[in-house]
Image: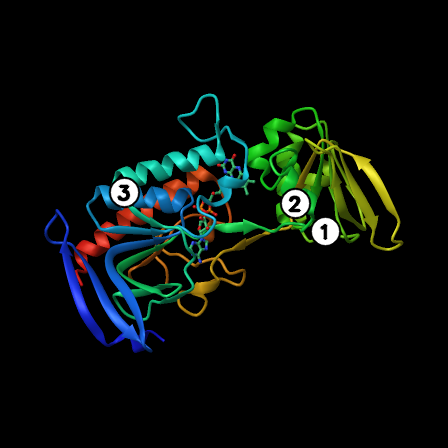
Amino acid sequence: MFSSLAAVCSVLIELTPSGKRFKVTALSIVRGKRVTFTVYDVIIIGSGPAGLTAAIYTSRAKFTTLVIGGLSWGGQLMLTGLVENFPGFPDGIFGPELMSRMRRQCEKLGVQILFEDVTAVDVSHRPFKINVGDKSLEARALIVATGASAKMLGLPAERRLVGKGVSYCATCDAPFFRDKKVVVVGGGDTALDEALALASYAREVIVVHRRDQLRACKLLQERAFADNKISFIWNRVVEDILGEGRVEAVKLKNTLTGEVSTMPTDGVFVAIGYKPNTDVFKGQVQLDDYGYIVVKDETKTSLEGVFAAGDNHDFRYKQAITAAGSGAKAALDVAKYLIEHPL
Ligand SMILES: Cc1cc2nc3c(=O)[nH]c(=O)nc-3n(C[C@H](O)[C@H](O)[C@H](O)COP(=O)(O)OP(=O)(O)OC[C@H]3O[C@@H](n4cnc5c(N)ncnc54)[C@H](O)[C@@H]3O)c2cc1C
């Protein structure tokens, strides 16, 4: 697909203030259609904490930087309420406000942000080619900061009540449930990790699992069974979440008998796993069996010049601050790479 871009009709070279580094805007006719493309020093895919932090670093280092931020810019924190564990905000800060501030900081530093999804990439040779609709963009280095999405139950009430009792992150939200009763949905490692984290705060933690056996590792099972705040309801799925302004109850369906019951609760933690947003990189950089980007030496992917940052490779910490830190690391590694590998 990209080879058909060969016929360049006109090229405009813009020297950046730093003189050496360049941005090239070119016009090409592909199958009778005008297509513009630009070579940036670095393109960052994703506008969550990892992507925007990386952009702050690369733009301050005077590398021409484009963030392709996605249709849902800002990432996972746009879905949450008060964030109490991001340093610098003693009273907490709302997730969308934190992301707006990061965006303003980027824009002030001259970062260009495109609010579209990347539809295809070709990283087989440099400059790397990134497709966004009918735009084809090029970069000397790439930071992939596409994050991950918590798997949802798919209930209409879930979206309505997210941040109002529905959560996908106990590390983030458990302190809001001090002395409350909460339900954790799931039966794998994530679910038991969440249940154990919640048990430090909540009065009662009930794990609802659709089968009669857990998939979680033995060690987590032993810990959860030994915790007297945690109990289990087997062979049930959450059919609905009830409540107007806040979660008040869950409707549970017995997977064996079909019987439906209602159980009051103050919160619902959905812990049925995460999906890394790496589909466009399948076959381009090495992914593990779950789709996470495989990194070595902190930020390097299997392909030289392509770096990864944030939750798309970090299935362990999954926090805004760790994603931001990972973005900073990727940017510093990109800077070193660009100096050592001028195109
Ligand atoms: C409800 C909720 C509450 C949370 N609360 C907290 C909290 O209180 N404290 C905390 O530290 N952490 C919290 N987290 C976790 C935190 O949000 C994540 O760890 C963090 O956002 C990960 O950052 P990231 O930049 O790696 O990815 P993300 O935030 O997931 O951002 C990824 C970005 O990539 C973009 N993208 C994906 N695919 C493409 C594509 N093909 N083209 C272009 N763009 C693309 C997306 O649109 C998005 O903008 C919470 C998470 C959730 C879901």
- Could you say where residue 100 lies in the image, as x and y percent from the top left? 41, 36
- Structural crowding at the residue carrying mark 3, measured as other residues with C-alpha within 10 Å and reported as few (<14), some (14–19) or many (≥20): many
Q: Which residue is drawn at 58% across and 39% down?
A: 169
Q: Which residue is drawn at 28% across and 60% down?
A: 305
- Looking at the rendered structure, which numbered label has been put on residue 289? none
State the residue lying farthest toward the left.
19
User: Which mark is nearer the camera, 3 or 1?
Assistant: 3
User: Which mark is nearer the camera, 3 or 2?
Assistant: 3
Q: Nearer the viewer, residue 262 or 110?
A: 110
Task: Read off the residue under disc 1.
Answer: 214
- Looking at the rendered structure, which numbered label has been put on residue 191? 2
Name the image colouring.
rainbow
Q: Quadrant of residue 295?
A: bottom left
Q: Residue at x 29, y 65 (%)?
A: 128
Let me know if residue 64 appears in the view: yes
**Earlier sequence position, callout 1 versus callout 2:** 2
Q: SS for tag 2?
A: helix
- State whether label 2 is within 8 Å of ligand 1: no
- Could you say where residue 154 lies in the image, as x and y percent from the top left? 67, 51
The reply to whether discs 1 and 2 touch (Cβ–Cβ < 8 Å) is yes
Quarter of the picture containing the N terminus is bottom left
Q: Which of 62 and 317 is in front in this view?
A: 62
Tell me the kind of residue under disc 3. Tyr
Seen in the picture, residue 124 relative to 142 is either above or below; the reply is: below
- Structural crowding at the residue carrying mark 2, measured as other residues with C-alpha within 10 Å and reported as few (<14), some (14–19) or many (≥20): many
Q: SS for tag 3?
A: helix
Task: Read off the residue under disc 3.
Answer: 57
- State whether label 3 is within 8 Å of ligand 1: no
